[in-house]
Image: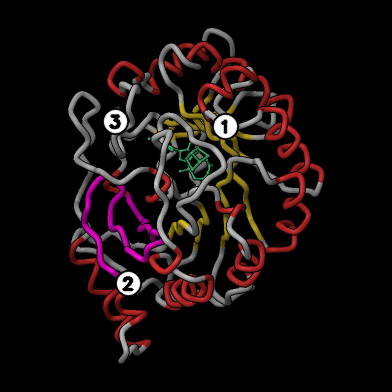
Amino acid sequence: MKAQNPTKLIDRFGRKVDYLRISITDRCDFRCVYCMAEEMTFLPRQQILSLEEIFLLAKTFVELGVKKIRITGGEPLIRKGALELLQQIGALEGLRELVLTTNGSQLVTAAPILKTANLKRLNISLDTLDAAKFKAITRTGDLQTVLNGIDAAKKVGFERIKLNAVILKNRNHDEVGDLVQFAIDKEIDISFIEEMPLGIVEKHNRAEAYYSSDEIRADLESRFTLQKSADNTGGPSDYYVVPNTQTRVGFISPHSHNFCSTCNRVRLTVEGRLLLCLGNEHSIDLKAILRAPDFNADNLKQAIIDSMEIKPEKHEFNVKEQPIILRYMNMTGG
Ligand code: SAM
Ligand code: SF4
């Protein structure tokens, strides 16, 4: 059992922050319509954190009491050296859970190495089981490659794999039942996510595409029994179990159910900005501290502790108006 120290990261509202999400790249092999514009300009190398800098920050957060780290992106598994970084972070003394969110495109080759990285859980994004729709939503992705990736992850023994599906009206809202059946057949979990207004995406109207968790749940209840689960993975998901199956169904509802009062997380972008809230711009520049000529580990720790003072009380998303958040989800890390 690894040693565990209480978190030193407590904000003005008494919320304890013990969960860090790290985006290790802004790049991706997909261009999902809700996440990115078709033509994206990615950050030049000197502007992004090196793998060594990311590891140092992860280690510092764990020393400050962070218990859970999620690696995300962009697509984290396309960054060179990602697997080694995961192995290093997974070995950090005091870290209880290392988890990864991926689009699944690299899993056929990456799954066996990931299994050696002390990864507790794998979230794989899958919005549709229809190859043509998959291509339309991801613009560049191939459904079969991702399905093979899911099987590869199961084969190497990952337990409690979870699918993440962003549901958009008139794109894939009619597939929620089939996605749950797929999860049941594979003995894995699934969460449905309401789309968040991050970044402006041309030819994609978020207000028209909005499909609420309540609508999804009502659709599912015509086909499955959903029993409220007492389980809470420490995230904003509301969980249900499907009786007589291994599958839990989660709903992440940033619009319809505000989960800010129990928020325990902060996000590190690949540029080294520490975002205190997904739905606000409040952040501090940790890269500047890391790269300062007089860098000192204590100053870094103090800056992170002090940042808790600017963690906002809550987010306000409004799909009907232009987003107040101009960064795309690939920058934020989902
Ligand atoms: N590329 C990886 C993937 O797709 O799983 C990891 C990064 S992606 C930004 C993380 C999660 O954010 C994915 O499940 C994706 O579907 C979700 N996501 C992206 N843009 C979103 C948006 N505007 N609203 C809600 N979820 C979004
Ligand atoms: Fe890439 Fe994930 Fe964004 Fe899709 S949601 S474009 S897979 S980062």
Residue that appears at 45% across and 23% down:
167
- Quick check: is 69 in the magenta stretch? no
- The numbered dot on residue 140 is 1
Image quarter of the C terminus:
top left
- The numbered dot on residue 255 is 3
Observer-side mark, 3 or 2, equals 2
Is the residue at mark 2 in contact range of ligand 1, meaning its CB lies under 8 Å from it? no
Q: Nearer the viewer, residue 140 or 302?
A: 140
Is the residue at mark 3 in contact range of ligand 1, meaning its CB lies under 8 Å from it? no
Mark 2 and mark 1 lie on one chain; the one further toward the N terminus is 1
Where residue 116 sits, quadrant-wise, is bottom right
Categorize mark 3 by other alpha carbons within 10 Å: few (<14), some (14-19), many (20+): some
Categorize mark 1 by other alpha carbons within 10 Å: few (<14), some (14-19), many (20+): some
Residue 148, position in %: x, y?
76, 35
Position above or below: 117 against 141: below
Residue type of the residue flagged with mark 2: Leu
Residue 67, position in %: x, y?
49, 65
Observer-side mark, 1 or 3, equals 1
In the drawing, does residue 121 fall left or right of residue 115?
left
Q: Nearer the viewer, residue 69 or 229?
A: 69
In the drawing, does residue 250 fall left or right of residue 257?
right
Mark 1 and mark 3 lie on one chain; the one further toward the N terminus is 1
Residue extent of the magenta highlight: 263-286
Q: Which residue is mark 2?
A: 286
